[in-house]
Image (tube, rainbow, N blue to C red):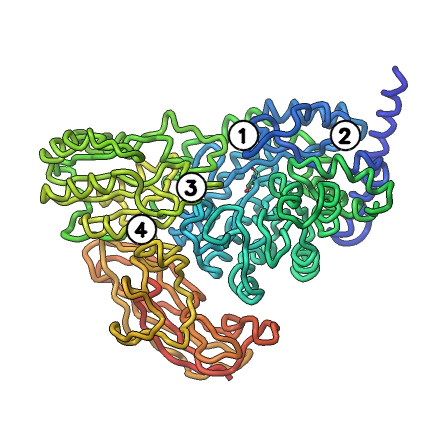
Amino acid sequence: MPMKSYIGLALCLLLFAACSQKPAGDKEAALNYKADSVLKLMTLQEKIGQMVLYTSDWDVTGPTIRSSYLDDIKKGNCGNIFNAHTVAYVRTLQKAAVEESRLGIPLLFGYDVIHGYKTIFPISLGEACSWDLAAIEKSARVSAIEAAASGLNWTFAPMVDISVEPRWGRVSEGAGEDPYLGSCIATARVKGFQGTDLADTSTILACVKHFAAYGAPLAGRDYNTVDMSRRVFLDTYLPPYKAAIEAGAGSVMTSFNELDGVPATGSKALLTDLLRKELGFKGIVVTDYTAINEMVNHGIVANEEEAGALALNAGVDMDMQGEIFFKYLEKQVKAGSVKVKQIDDAVRRILRVKFELGLFDDPYKYCSEAREKANVYSKENLEAALDVAKRSLVLLKNDNQALPLRKGDKIAVIGELAASKRDLLGSWIAAGQWENIPSLLDAMETYQGDILYAEGCKKMGDDRTGFAEALRTAAKADKIVLVIGESCDWCGEASSRSDIHVPGVQTELLAELNKLGKPVVVVLMNGRPLDLSREESLADALLETWFAGSMGGEAITQVLYGEYNPSGKLTMSFPRNIGQVPIFYYEKNTGRPIYLPNDKYKSKYIDVPNDPLFPFGFGLSYTTFEYSNLQLSDTLLSNGGSLKATVQVKNTGKVKGEEVIQWYIRDLVGSVTRPVKELKGFQKMELNPGESRTVAFTLTPDKLAFHRIDMSFGTEPGEFLVFVGGNSSDVMQKRFQLR
Ligand code: NOJ
């Protein structure tokens, strides 16, 4: 046996001994003990190797810096890989780490499994519109099962960035504008990905991103500066990150943006003082893609070497793709500008996660071909995707009983998007495949058989040559279904828009079709709130379908034909025009709110109403719901006590349907001004025709807490309103007092 192999064998035995010893004490102490046992064996270079994350040559979202990552793995210079998946590929790379590096430390394998791995669910914004936490958790669960069966142990999700910016393309990846709903969804997603035991072979590590406030770029331009008061940050933007961390998320990704003049990736205030000390986060902090390097462009450091030190000192553990830690940390330790202790702390956190995942016990635990075959893209998973997709669709308008369609109707389907498979999946589609999924047109043809179709026009561009054929086709039908919207690559990263109209000549085609005098149903596919003022005035019905995933065609068909009664509600306000942006329901009253529409010196526009075209929480059903008899158990709420609010909700239509009952509050007078409404609870329930139920909501003081004038978090006594309704603007209210 050559000398090198003897050394390797001895180290392996040592490592095994270290890892298998069980110290007394709690889980934390045990993890630290195990991580420290490995840490002791590591050279500085190997430690730094654990602090880097390189992309394989698949699916990069920016320039790939290193092509020689296999060599790096063997040399112990790379402890983590992303964008490498499938059991065969992962096993090859894991083998290089475990069998060919000196210490054999297993790799983490990360990937952007955002709304599905191969079975693609609706884009996250769409899923959020289901307001169905169980369905959302299930979607993350299925995604984790598929990803874990394909060799992965880490997803860069959930994205929990609150956003009130439809110009920003990444609103498609989040849950929308509301901190409370966003927090509930963040929790559901973390639970879905991580399950109850990270060591289970069907769970993967979640990564909360992008920390922090990435959803508020100025002018909606991706990667742009974020500038907000600390109070707004703490009350509105922080809650979903906090919820995800409380739910046990094992990693956090830093954001590209600056906040209060400091790029998040170099902000000790964010990463150490807030994240670790205040929120008690114990997992890994990974940067976004080359975010350390970008601090030079931000102008916060003079060069990359300084950027590395700033990031490490701020609390970053792992450098995604930037090579900064790899290039400079060793030199900086030797020069004394960086302390080994900081490196040890970061590596300990990384090793702990690898222990928690069970990778030291079995580095190939995510590499089972049998599981891959059985668990990926299974019938059961596709059914789950269909279920969530149906729930995510939002009916925005339905006049003249345009919907539901009837099988006997002669239907003309028009629009490029009707026949598109790729667009249905949206952005960030991981290993999603669209070639064999049914388009909406396919699904409608399967359902009804004799659908007429004409493309009419493309989703982009100004070619009107297809209009004539579309009009001829539509003239033969009883009802017209026009499918319009954005291209799937117009949402997601680096896809900001300054104009949020439906692109190209699609709306012109709608105007032409409208002249035929037949009912026109517009099916929208898009990844952000759009300005739909024109479409709203031209269409009889509007169905917002987002990008609904692998089973989107089937889900939309079921809703169009009334096989499923739509139940989705918007989680972002849809403006009347771009000039209203940013627009969100939890605005402040201002000193000059409008009471009468013609008052001049009020906080308003002279050319458009203040309210959005479609408010937060809005969505129609094929039935109607009536709210009545809002009651409070008392009008006084004392600290430590609770109040019960009840309301009667009745299905007053002819079909069964689900309603999202939304509870809001308003603090009328505070030491700082408070929003006119804040969501504090919701229930989704199904009611049969004529059925009426009493729905209850418990008000407790913690629901009324906020950051007060002195920045402490808590309540203030005084007068409050509680509201209930089926959307944020159509509500009933009662008054109560907090003592
Ligand atoms: C950049 C994106 O901002 C982030 O969300 C993603 O996880 C990484 N690239 C890795 O693909």
Q: Which mark is residue 553?
A: none
Is 129 left or right of 689, judged from the image as shown?
right
Q: Which mark is residue 59?
A: 1
Whole-percent x, y for residue 390 in the image: 33, 44
Q: Secondary structure at mark 2?
A: loop
Q: Secondary structure at mark 3?
A: loop
Which circle's residue, 4 or 3, is located before the other in the chain?
A: 3
Residues marked 4 and 3 touching at CB (< 8 Å): no
Q: Quadrant of the N terminus?
A: top right
Q: Which residue type does callout 2 highlight?
A: Gly
Q: Which residue type does callout 4 highlight?
A: Asp
Which circle's residue, 3 or 2, is located before the other in the chain?
A: 2
| Residue at image mark 3 | 491
Q: 10 Å neighbourhood of mark 3: few (<14), some, or many (≥20)?
A: many
Q: Quadrant of residue 88?
A: top right
Q: CA distance from mark 2 to mark 1?
A: 24 Å
Q: 10 Å neighbourhood of mark 2: few (<14), some, or many (≥20)?
A: many
Q: CA distance from mark 2 to mark 4?
A: 52 Å
Q: 10 Å neighbourhood of mark 1: few (<14), some, or many (≥20)?
A: some
- What residue is at 61 percent from the left and 75 percent from the top? 710
Which circle's residue, 2 or 1, is located before the other in the chain?
A: 1
Which circle's residue, 1 or 3, is located before the other in the chain?
A: 1
Whole-percent x, y for residue 731 in the image: 32, 69
Q: Which residue type does callout 3 highlight?
A: Cys
Q: Which residue type does callout 1 highlight?
A: Asp
| Residue at image mark 2 | 76
| Residue at image mark 4 | 531
Q: Is residue 405 above or below residue 568?
A: above
Q: CA distance from mark 3 to mark 2?
A: 38 Å
Q: CA distance from mark 4 to mark 3?
A: 15 Å
